[in-house]
Amino acid sequence: MTDFTIVKTGSLAAISIFTLIAMSSVPSPANAAEETCFTIPTPVVSLGFGSRYETASATRSDIDEESDAAVTKALKPIDQFIQNLAKQVTKAGKETDPATRKEYQRCVIDAVYQWAAANALSDMRTDNAKLSVPSRVGGIAIAYAQSRNQVSGVSDRQRVIEKWLLERGRATVDFFDNDATKGAARNNLRAWASLAVGEVGILNEDKPLTDWAILSNRTMIAGASVDGSLPLEMNRKQYALHYQLHAMSPLVTSIARLCDAGYGKGGADLAKLATMAKFSFDAVKDPTIVHKITGIKQTVKPGLKDNTSSLGWLEPYVSLSNDKKLESEFADLRPLSNSKLGGNVTELYGKRRISCVISAIR
């Protein structure tokens, strides 16, 4: 520690004290960097794990606790990385100082670049890993999109990032089109894949990818029941409502982001999407709605306040639908947040109206 000597003469003592206070309040370059970024973790390149559920569980509703813990542990570093990226995006959105805002955005680009340069998430060794990674790719892509082209001198890094994301997006399409099980190819996992592929397609102006996402979203909506429930998710017994919400998060967000980028609604039935949104929202308030369908009590607790982490999709939905009545019912829960949807979704969508008119270069 530096030894400061204070001269015992009134004015000089005061000057020395003020100097010490001033020096202690100025962060060192290292500390300043830490304040505008986080420690970027080692990129995760390979993943290989089994199912969270017991092998004999046809409905994938009987959790194998040991396997579940192993999956969570394997995915934790990636999920923490995405959470940190989302926090940076949120900080940038709230920051009033332009220079500091750009440092937050630079942090996101630098962090994603490190993972892209290492070809992270490229070696998926099991089908379950391949099913789990698209939602993570989507989370990274959305965080990156919020910082893209906001910082000077990083164009080379952006090219590396976008090429890496393009490879991940194409690998996702190949897996879901050719190797995913029939159920996984049509349930909430397909919705998460659609969000990732659509976002990557927007970033790279890749029409085959955006078309794949649009078709996926259209198919998800077409497969919903008249009441707005998703049959494949209703088969999940006590987890039915949990997975209904888990599907709505990427589905609604994907449609909103594709519309916002000028790709139109792609044939998506927005009236039926409204029915799905109402069913999901009402079921959170009263899970017995799903209980009557499944014949079993749901794990989701009744009430909006206990389920805010599952309701981030409401913000992009209201931006799409302009449903003021529904908005008034959850307004006091704001801000809503979900790291895989971009962090503070209220900040991203809360005061916006998204048009589904086609305007993107095709």
Image: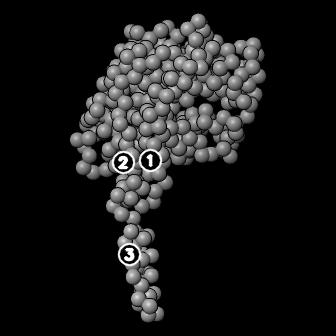
Is residue 76 toward the left or the right of residue 202 in the image? Answer: right
Residue type for callout 1: Gln
Residue type for callout 2: Cys
- Asked if labels 2 and 3 touch by Cβ distance under 8 angstroms, the answer is no
Label 1: how many Cα within 10 Å (few below 14, some 14–19, many 20+): many
- Identify the residue at horizontal 41%, vertical 88% (top origin): 7
Looking at the image, the residue that sits furthest to the left is 156
* Element marked by disc 3: loop
- Asked if labels 2 and 1 touch by Cβ distance under 8 angstroms, the answer is yes
First of labels 3, 2 by sequence position: 3
Residue position for label 2: 107
Residue position for label 1: 88
First of labels 3, 1 by sequence position: 3
- Comparing marks 3 and 2, which lies closer to the viewer? 3
- Asked if labels 1 and 3 touch by Cβ distance under 8 angstroms, the answer is no
Quarter of the rendering containing residue 261: top left
- Identify the residue at horizontal 42%, vertical 71% (top origin): 24
Task: Give the x, y percent position of residue 318.
Answer: 59, 37
In which quadrant will I find the C terminus?
Answer: top left
Residue type for callout 3: Asp
* Element marked by disc 1: helix
The answer for how far apart the CA atoms under marks 3 and 2 are is: 35 Å
Task: Give the x, y percent position of residue 160.
Answer: 26, 35
In which quadrant will I find the N terminus?
Answer: bottom left
- Identify the residue at horizontal 55%, vertical 29% (top origin): 249
Label 3: how many Cα within 10 Å (few below 14, some 14–19, many 20+): few
Front one among 73 and 299: 73
First of labels 1, 2 by sequence position: 1
Front one among 41 and 152: 41
Label 2: how many Cα within 10 Å (few below 14, some 14–19, many 20+): many
Residue position for label 3: 3
